[in-house]
Image (tube, rainbow, N blue to C red):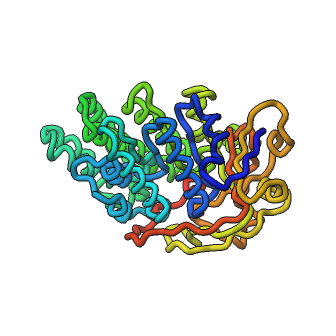
Amino acid sequence: MLVQRLGAPSDFDPLLARVADARIVMLGEATHGTYDYYRLREQLTRRLIAECGFSFVAVEGDWPDCDRVNRSVTAVPRGAPDPLAALERFERWPTWMWANAEVARFCRWLRAWNLDRPQAARAGFHGLDVYSLWESMQAIFDYLGEEDPGSLEAAQEAYRCFEPYGKRPEEYGLASRFVSARCEEEVVRLLARTREQAAADGADRFSAWQNAEVVAGAERYYRTMVNGGDDSWNVRDTHMADTLDRLLDRYGPDARGVVWAHNTHVGDARATDMAGAGLVNVGQLARERHGDPAVVLVGFGSYRGGVVAAPRWGSAAEAMTTPPARPGSLEHRLHELLPERAVLVFDGADQPDWVTGTVDHRAIGVVYDPSREARSNYVPTRLGERYDAFVWCDETTALHPLPALTTPGELETYPAGM
């Protein structure tokens, strides 16, 4: 194992050496609201794009919202001249995950970097997630209305199937227990039509296809979610892994992608208690599909500090204090062993017991109650199997959300709230 103190972006050199032959690098976070994770992830991603030729960043966010950001950072027609304007349009709760000052700074850098390059060589910014049923449906209408009016009827049929449930997809999920599979059938037809159209070249066609994939995935997700259990987690993470693969295909045989998502999606589920519950995640699926050498998984963690989260599902975000990690946890051990900032690269057979053994590893989602910290928020983890590298921040500060419109959060089901 190699341990490198972090003080400047150049200190990531050992990690960049580790990703030299990787096609996919996934950068995690132990919370969705910590400035330090976003800042360090930004520094590393800049180097991956500028020095290693990575083709795009794919985040745990909605495709339609991130597509507006992508248009801005790649400077295509109808793209906002400032990515901040696209980020300020994020409305789905929790908006602070991507509508924040840290992401805005990275996206402004990415646009400036792209403007010096031909269109085909510009790095994109995309969303992997499955939640945006209605937004993706509207995006399909907008595309078909301009480019393929003859296919609009198929989209309208799918829309009419969902329309009785308003814009609360969990209501559709509840109703799907008692109604026929007509909505599913309409979505399958819509997906087949848009996939056929997307065979032709063009970013707009590809985006329409992806929005149809989101509608299909969201229909499965919300129908599965209300049946209880953890199956909806697998629907969601499989959709994100499939989207990542479509992006790699879209960018070409030499494409390389960076993923930004929570540790619970990035770190291989087989090295946690998720495996015993039958759960998979994006990191595991990428390793299985592309092979371990082509995938580098990087976790993040901290001992204490500040975080932005919400006390209840759908409520306003707050700056909270994360208490010191509980004794015996990974974070408590690293607090005693490591400098304030460090990157660990796991390689070789001679690893300490806290890398090879099972240890509790903190995970904080968008909903957080610091007073319950000692009884929850920890995932049993074999660190060296879950990740290829780990970024350590002993003490952190809270993220800086942008002012944004917020819609109420959908029905919460653990662990989909990560």
Name the residue: 36% across, 45% down.
114
In the rendered image, residue 319, in percent from the top left (x then y), is placed at 58, 74
Between 122 and 62, the one nearer to me in the picture: 122
Q: Quadrant of residue 202?
A: top left
In the rendered image, residue 123, in percent from the top left (x then y), is placed at 39, 42
Name the residue: 32% across, 35% down.
120
Left or right of 174? Residue 327 is right
Left or right of 111? Residue 327 is right
In the rendered image, residue 408, in percent from the top left (x then y), is placed at 43, 68
Name the residue: 56% across, 39% down.
25
In the rendered image, residue 10, in percent from the top left (x then y), is placed at 61, 47
Q: In which quadrant is the C terminus drawn?
A: bottom right
Q: Quadrant of residue 337?
A: bottom right
Residue 156 seen from this side: no
Indicate whether 21 appears above or below 322: above
Q: In which quadrant is the N terminus drawn?
A: top right
Name the residue: 30% across, 49% down.
71
Indicate whether 228 appears above or below 239: below
Residue 276 seen from this side: yes
Between 328 and 56, the one nearer to me in the picture: 56
Give the tally of numbered discs. Answer: 0
